[in-house]
Amino acid sequence: MMMLHLHNPLPHSPPSSSSSSSGNSLFLLGNHHYHVNNWKSSCQLEETVRFLHNNHKRHKKCSPIRSSLPSIDQLINARVIYSVAPSMGHNQEAHPESHFRVPAIVNALEEMKLTSKFRGSEVIELQHFEPASTDDIASVHARSYVSGLEKVMDQALEKGLIVIDGSGPTYATSTTFQESIVAAGAGLALVDSVVAASKINKDSPTGFALIRPPGHHAIPQGPMGFCIFGNVAIAARHAQRVHGLKRVFIIDFDVHHGNGTNDAFYNDPDVFFLSFHQDGSYPGTGKFDEVGAGDGLGTTLNLPLPGGSGDTTIRTVFDEVIVPCAQRFKPDIILVSAGYDGHVLDPLANLQLTTGTYYMLASNIKQLAKDLCRGRCVFFLEGGYNLKSLSYSVADTFRALLGDKSLASEFDNPNILYEEPSKKVKQAIQRIKCIHSL
């Protein structure tokens, strides 16, 4: 394998909100190629994959299309606005973060009649949006990383799949850079749309970016843990810089700690980052005492939960931790790193969240945004690697955002659940309430 340095190594620096920092980014180039047609799945999912893959190829041949916001009439009637960026070329065979993830969700939304085709003006899919610019990405990430990743795309095309050393394992293909800036741009377009709607409606529609690669592990200096660029962090800076929304509240309910988002805003008093995640899981960060530093002291909250935590735990966390934090912070917008890998069926962790848990979270977060910031809220897809639990849970999230009744009982099986570690959970919640004076 060939090693390729994106930029000169510098000593490791502590978490910082600065986007100008540098660090080690090491790429290993091998002779592995992705083969879309080698994947096995249902006929319907294969059709969706082929459709999105063909759209991806057409998009590559076209010049970027200017973003087009929904009309005022559309925004007034909408309850959910979503965007799709499936990154069909960014794929490694047998990798859990595969190009089947977003098509599985799109397929489920169609099957369950949750798209505009069936819901009319209640649901809007943003069809045209610009990729994020270099300046957008560099508002969070080191420019040396951004330019270095773009430069190695030609080598990836020539040599094969890029495996990023020591990052979790993160891979890249020859299309990864372009598809990653398209994914980030899909999130920015949703922020623009939700903000526009909030100016004409006290309860604006909620956004959901159905995008990959995920972003919350990507640190300012480089990629990490399946993540290339920090989509939610980039959106937070966009909300501040473009729309003047100074105070941003980020909720991360992925089963793994969002260390990249954590690091990006660790010293920033205007961005509150709140993560609850499985204790001891990858990447091993997100301890109770990681609370921010400098001017940002107190605006980072990390709650590691014991394995086996489930619906009862998350309900308590929402009521006793998330709500009082958000009320005290008084955000101008709420952004959500929506990871579905805490589901009891997901292969990469050991929590007992259910489809019903995600419905509850979405419903409560939507209400919180309505109460605190005119409904301004955008969800960003992060993890979730069991295609069935992922797609059903995102679909039930859509139902919550639409105000529909949950259909989680048609999917969830209570017989596979076991008793939650209530004593350990209570101790964890009491500890975090004490640390943050809740």
Image (spheres, rainbow, N blue to C red):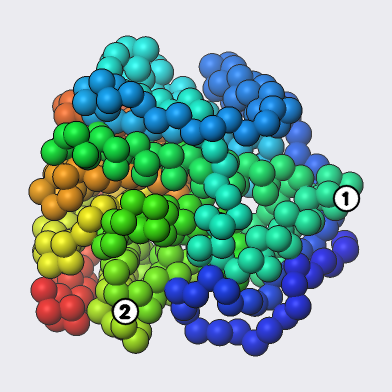
- Quarter where residue 8 is shown: bottom right
Query: Residue 289: x and y, percent?
Result: 31, 83
Report the mark closest to the observer, 2 or 1: 2
Among the two numbered marks 2 and 1 on one chain, the one whose residue lies closer to the N terminus: 1
Residue 164 location (% of width, % of height): 71, 62
Left or right: 315, with 211 as reference point: left
**Three-letter amino acid code at disc 2?**
Gly
Query: In what element is the residue under mark 2?
Result: helix
Coordinates of residue 7 in the picture (x, y in percent) = 75, 72
Q: Which residue is mark 2?
A: 296
Estimate the spatial distance between the alpha carbons at disc 2 and disc 1, rounded to whole Å.
43 Å
Residue type indicated by callout 1: Lys
Dividing the image into 4 quarters, which one contains the C terminus? bottom left
Number of numbered discs visible in the structure rendering: 2
Q: Secondary structure at mark 1?
A: helix
Residue at 87%, 62% in the rendered image: 1
Residue 324 showing in the rendered view: yes
Q: Which mark is residue 159?
A: 1
**Label 1 Cα crowd, 10 Å radius (few <14 / some 14-19 / many 20+):** some
The structure residue drawn at horizontal position 61% and vertical position 62%, both measured from the top left corner, is 223
Badge 2 density bin: few <14, some 14–19, many ≥20, Cα 10 Å: some
Q: Is residue 18 left or right of 117 when viewed as pictured?
A: right
